Amino acid sequence: MTKAAPAEAAIVMTTAGSEADAESLASAMVESRLAACVQVMPIRSFYVWRGKPQRDAEWLLLIKTRGEHYVALETFIRAHHGYETPEIVMVPVSAGSPDYLAWLTAGTELAGRP
């Protein structure tokens, strides 16, 4: 049965320019417990950068985390990301399965903190 998510459940999105960079970021976020899970998938992005249209292959990272970890996660991404202006966007999770949300919460317990 689906229920409303705890306020702290969130998905943060960022992109990377290569699979290796995406995997490195994903592994480090999970190992540090800033994320319970990171899904990595290839995408094609269309955007304007410095006044010029761009079309690039990128890797999208969907980072399953707690909203309370956003500041630490953003700081981590900025410190380890190769882009000058990385995408870092948080989307709150409004509902989900209770067992998955409990797993997400347990998977993002930082050392010394619940």
Image (cartoon, grey):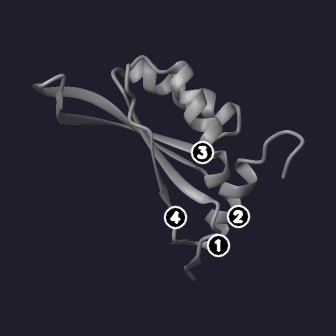
Which mark is nearer the camera, 1 or 4? 4
Residue 74 x, y percent position in the rendering: 55, 35
Q: Residue at 67% x, 51% y: name it.
A: 68
Residue highlighted by disc 2: 102
Please name which of the two marks, 3 or 2, marks the residue nearer to the observer.
Answer: 3
Q: Nearer the viewer, residue 76 or 19?
A: 76
Q: CB of mark 3 within 8 Å of CB of mark 1?
A: no
Q: Give the residue at x 43% y 18%.
A: 20
Separation (CA) of disc 4 from disc 2 = 13 Å
Q: What amino acid is found at the position of numbered circle 3 in the picture?
A: Tyr
- Discs 3/1, front: 3
Helix, strand or loop for disc 1: helix
Between discs 3 and 4, the one toward the N terminus:
3
Q: Position of residue 37 (x, y in %)?
A: 58, 45
Give the amino acid type for the residue marked by disc 2 in the picture. Ala
SS class, disc 2: helix
Q: Residue at x 60, y 45 (%)?
A: 70
In this rendering, which labeled residue sits more in front, label 4 or label 2?
Answer: 4
Reading the chain from its start, which is encountered first: label 3 or label 2? 3
Q: Considering the numbered disc 3 on the image, is that residue within a helix, a strand or a loop?
A: helix
Q: Quadrant of residue 31?
A: top right
Amino acid type of the residue that numbered disc 1 sits on in the rendered structure: Pro
Label 3 sits on residue? 70
Q: 35 left or right of 42?
A: right
Residue contact at pointers 2 and 1, CB within 8 angstroms: yes
Q: CA distance from mark 3 to mark 2?
A: 18 Å
State the quadrant of the N terminus.
bottom right
Identify the residue at image location x=29%, y=29%: 58
Q: Amino acid at mark 4?
A: Val
Can you identify the residue that label 1 sits on? 98
Disc 4: which residue: 93
